[in-house]
Structure formats: C-alpha cells, structure tokens
Image: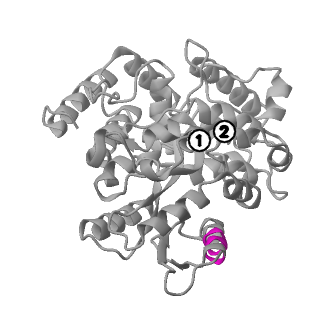
C-alpha cells in the first residue's frame, strides 16, 4: 500500500549514464516509487567511468547525502567500501545465494556486503563461423591453438585477395581493458590474478611470463600493430568490417555485429575464451552493482529500492528489454528469457567461471595497481621491455605501493 506524504521518502539514484541503461533504470525506479509511494530523483552522471568514480568519491568523502543509491562498477566495491552501507542485515538469508557466487564474493569487503549484483558481463571469444567451416577448423580450445588457427585463416584469406584480414583482434590500449584481456591470458595459463585473495603479489611467475610472451608474438603477425591502441570499439569495428577471424570482446558486441547492415551478420559464432590445462575457461568479470550510501537520509527506502532493482522480476525485464545479463543464476534457465536471448545459455557457464580482478583485496589502491599492471603489460606487448624483467619490476612497484603491509 503506498505511503502517505508524511512518511514518503525521497531517494536520489545515480545509475547508468546514457541511452538504454539510464532509461531502463529510470523506468524500474519509477515503478518502485509508484508501488511504495516514495519519490525517486534520477541523478545525471558523467559518461566516462573514471570521471564518474571521481565524482562519487568526492561526494562520499564529503559525507554528502545528495545521492542515496549508486550504480558502481565491478572493480569499485573495494575502493568505495568505507562509504557504503553493509547490506547483509537487510537481505533475506537466501537472497545473495540466488546470485552467482563470484559476484557476491566480489561485493564483500572485510565481511561486509557493500553492494548487490545488478547485471553481469564477461569476456567472450567471437569467431567467423563461416571461415571455420571453409577451412574445416575447430573452435580453438587453448590460446596456442587459437594462435595457430588464426594464422591459418589469415593466410588463407589473404591468399584469396583479402589483404586486410587479420587473425585476432582484442583490446590492447594501455587502460583497464588491457588489464581484463591480459588477466584472462595469464589466469587461464595458471599465472594467477596479479594479487591473490590474501593480498600476496603473485604476478612475477613463469606462467605469466609465458602467457605474455605468446601474446606479444601476436602483435604484427596475427594481430594488427594498431591493436596496441584498440579499445572495445576499435576491435569491434575491425571484426564487424569482416577484417578479422577472431575477436575478444564483451557480450554487447554481438547484437551490433549482427545488425542487417553488418558485413558479417549471420556469420558470427561465440564461445568461452580458451581454457586452462584443466579445461576451464575463465573470462574476466565485468558488470555493475547497486550500493547505498552511508550518508543517505532515507537508508531503509534506498535499500528497498536496491532489493527491488536487483531482484529476479526486475532483472528478467531488463534482460528482455535491454539485453542486460542477469546476476541470478536460475534466470539463465528461464524458458522465456532463453527464447528472447539464446546467448544466455552460453553466458551462464562463462559468468559462473569468471575471474574477478583483484579490486576487493587491493581496495582503494586498485586503480593504482591496475595502472601499474596495464602499463607493464603494454611495454611487453610493444617490445619495449622483456616479460621477465617487466614483471619483476612490476612486482617491486606493487610491493612498494602496498608498503609491505596488507592492502
């Protein structure tokens, strides 16, 4: 039953930035407001994620009550944890258990559940199904096999006159996207996650060296030299133009590459990224969470809004309306959702085995850790530094950054 004016709360929400993400958030929040009698106010935020994080940090550090509910990136819980409410007491005991365990664990900082998973993302391997069939080749199962198959397809297509064809495109610019890509190579080569869950720096190891040595060998051979300045969209543009056999990207790229005007529409397949020695494929975890400010003037209403927006009914609607991947595992078996989004069947396995970046354990220093890491990897890929020396120096810088103590 809606509340009366005297008891209604005003809840300010900063979720999404532009386009369908912002619009679906607004619609969901307004449905909640109509049902509860509370008032929702949508807050505009910068499009750029780094600018958005800086704004959130500024407001929260000032103990501002101006925003009650924040949409935060998957790598922000550790950074913002001191300013966020612990949601554990407000959630039913089985509520977090409905969500993928890796997502819930990513949002627990020092035992506090500082955010609830809202939608999930994980890296995928895109491939030209028509070219695999043409050359009678399988979907690669390891990074070495991908290297060999990509080279064979590239050579065959170039010999047929497609001189612009490349074997494999990905995100190689010195930014967070390179952290994601390279962590997938390293983790699936049993090289760890830069910093492990206890805070130990693990990046300086032979498996990480081997993974990055292989990746560096791609540049200029099966991957264009310009990949070292590619983000998601540059990689998508090359693949969608028909100039690459394989691509690593997030799920969003499938719908765009399959548009009727796309040269590769109807020719695309997707698969989990290449596997490790045990046969497990682990993509880096992406996505967003919803959190409540410690300085909210209406914490109970804000928590109720988070509970509603991250619930199964809302997540199912968002998946159908906007293609946002649910964080509740049972929704990946929902017949209606599978009919609308056949990709979900494959994505369930990808999300369930996804690997989180070490943002929770490194906390407020994660951005510095990632910056040091992606610059070291970029130096290796560009040939400016040897992998062994670069990772050893990186480990030393990270030890200095941690000041020899727990993160």
Viewer-side residue, 46 vs 119: 119
Viewer-side residue, 227 vs 256: 256
Viewer-side residue, 238 vs 192: 192
Q: Please give left or right for residue 68 compared with residue 232 in the image.
A: left
Element carrying mark 2? helix
Element carrying mark 1? loop
Q: How many marks?
A: 2
Residue 243 x, y percent position in the rendering:
70, 43
Q: Please give left or right for residue 69 compared with residue 85 in the image.
A: right
Which residue does the image show at 40% across and 16% down from the upper left? 207
Query: For the residue carrying disc 1, how many other residues have a C-alpha within 10 Å: few (<14), some (14-19), or many (20+)?
Result: many
27 within the magenta span: yes
**Residues drawn in magenta:** 26-34
Residue 405 x, y percent position in the rendering:
15, 33
Q: Earlier along the polypeptide chain: callout 2 or callout 1?
A: 1
Quickly name the residue at label 1.
Answer: 99
Q: Please give left or right for residue 359 compared with residue 102 in the image.
A: left
- Magenta-colored segment: predominant secondary structure: helix
Residue 370 x, y percent position in the rendering:
34, 42
> Do the residues bearing badges 2 and 1 touch, measured as CB atoms within 8 Å?
yes
Viewer-side residue, 17 vs 124: 17
Q: Is residue 131 visible?
A: yes
Quarter of the rendering occupied by the N terminus: bottom right
Which residue does the image show at 18% across and 37% down from the upper left? 402
Which residue does the image show at 75% across and 27% down from the upper left? 156
Question: What residue occupies the far top of the structure in this picture?
Answer: 277
Residue 310 x, y percent position in the rendering:
59, 55
Quarter of the rendering occupied by the C terminus: top left
Quickly name the residue at label 2.
Answer: 329
Above or below, 115 relative to 124: below
């Amino acid at each position: 039953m809606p509340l009366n004016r005297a008891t209604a709360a005003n809840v300010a929400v900063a979720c999404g930035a532009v386009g369908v993400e912002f619009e679906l958030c607004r619609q969901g929040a307004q449905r909640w407001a109509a049902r509860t009698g509370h008032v929702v106010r949508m807050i505009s935020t910068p499009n750029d994620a780094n600018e958005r994080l800086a704004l959130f940090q500024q407001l929260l550090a000032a103990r501002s009550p101006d925003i009650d509910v924040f949409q935060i990136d998957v790598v922000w819980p550790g950074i913002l944890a001191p300013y966020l409410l612990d949601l554990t007491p407000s959630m039913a005991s089985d509520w977090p258990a409905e969500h993928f365990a890796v997502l819930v664990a990513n949002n627990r900082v020092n035992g506090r559940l500082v955010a609830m998973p809202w939608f999930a993302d994980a890296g995928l391997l895109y491939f030209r199904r028509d070219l695999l069939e043409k050359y009678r080749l399988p979907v690669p199962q390891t990074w070495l096999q991908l290297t060999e198959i990509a080279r064979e397809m590239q050579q065959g297509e170039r010999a047929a006159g497609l001189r612009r064809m490349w074997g494999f495109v990905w995100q190689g610019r010195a930014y967070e996207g390179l952290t994601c890509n390279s962590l997938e190579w390293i983790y699936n080569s049993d090289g760890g996650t830069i910093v492990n869950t206890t805070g130990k720096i693990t990046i300086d190891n032979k498996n990480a060296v081997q993974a990055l040595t292989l990746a560096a060998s791609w540049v200029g051979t099966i991957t264009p030299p310009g990949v070292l300045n590619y983000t998601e969209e540059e990689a998508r543009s090359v693949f969608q133009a028909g100039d690459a056999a394989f691509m690593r990207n997030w799920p969003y790229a499938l719908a765009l590459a399959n548009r009727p005007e796309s040269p590769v529409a109807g020719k695309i397949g997707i698969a989990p990224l290449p596997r490790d020695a045990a046969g497990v494929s682990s993509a880096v975890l992406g996505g967003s969470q919803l959190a409540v400010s410690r300085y909210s003037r209406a914490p109970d209403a804000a928590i109720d809004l988070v509970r509603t927006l991250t619930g199964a009914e809302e997540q199912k609607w968002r998946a159908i309306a906007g293609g946002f991947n649910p964080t509740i595992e049972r929704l990946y078996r929902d017949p209606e959702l599978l009919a609308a989004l056949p990709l979900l069947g494959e994505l369930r396995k990808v999300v369930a085995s996804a690997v989180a970046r070490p943002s929770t354990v490194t906390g407020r220093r994660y951005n510095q850790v990632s910056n040091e890491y992606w610059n070291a990897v970029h130096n290796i890929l560009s040939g400016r530094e040897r992998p062994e020396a670069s990772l050893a120096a990186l480990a030393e810088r990270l030890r200095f950054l941690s000041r020899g103590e727990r993160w």
